[in-house]
Image (cartoon, rainbow, N blue to C red):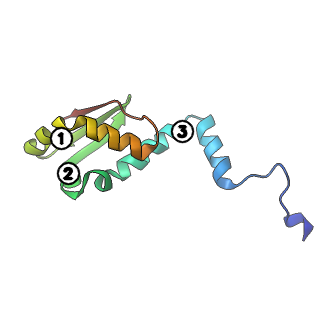
Amino acid sequence: MSDLKRTSNEAPLKEVLDRWLKAYGYDGKMKEMDVLEAWPEMMGTAVANRTSEIYIKNKKLFLKMDSSVMREELSYGKDVIIQRVNEKAGAEIITDVWFG
């Protein structure tokens, strides 16, 4: 039974994975993926259903919208989108939003 005890060099798996992701520069990518997956939750189903393409590159969120009216409306709320995305990520992962 004594070999089941934790030694001082053991760490929880989450901690090890977090350190590994950070060491190899993947922590930012994971945050981006989490945000893209949460797009419907952050913006609502109406916006999500009209978003045909979404990705992040060089701290810019690129959105391709099926509706020109929706694209126009969202362009006025860029600051809100940036705030919601960065809040969800827990870090500044975007600084601008581009519509296509």
Q: Furthest residue to the right? A: 2
Marks 1/2 in contact by CB < 8 Å: the verdict is yes
Q: Residue 26 carries which label?
A: 3
Marks 3/1 in contact by CB < 8 Å: the verdict is no
* Residue at x 40%, y 43% (from the top left corner): 87
* Residue at x 12%, y 45% (from the top left corner): 70
37 vs 52, left or right, is right
Answer above or below: position of 11 versus 54. Answer: below
Q: Which tag, 1 or 2, sits closer to the chain's start?
A: 2
**Total numbered circles:** 3
What distance separates the C-alpha of mark 1 from that of mark 2? Answer: 9 Å
Q: Which tag, 2 or 3, sits closer to the chain's start?
A: 3
Secondary-structure class at tag 3: loop
Q: Which residue carries the number 1 mark?
A: 74
Q: Which mark is residue 47?
A: 2
Q: What residue type is labelled 1?
A: Leu
Provide residue 69's location: percent of width, then percent of height: 8, 43
* Residue at x 27%, y 40% (from the top left corner): 80
Secondary-structure class at tag 2: helix
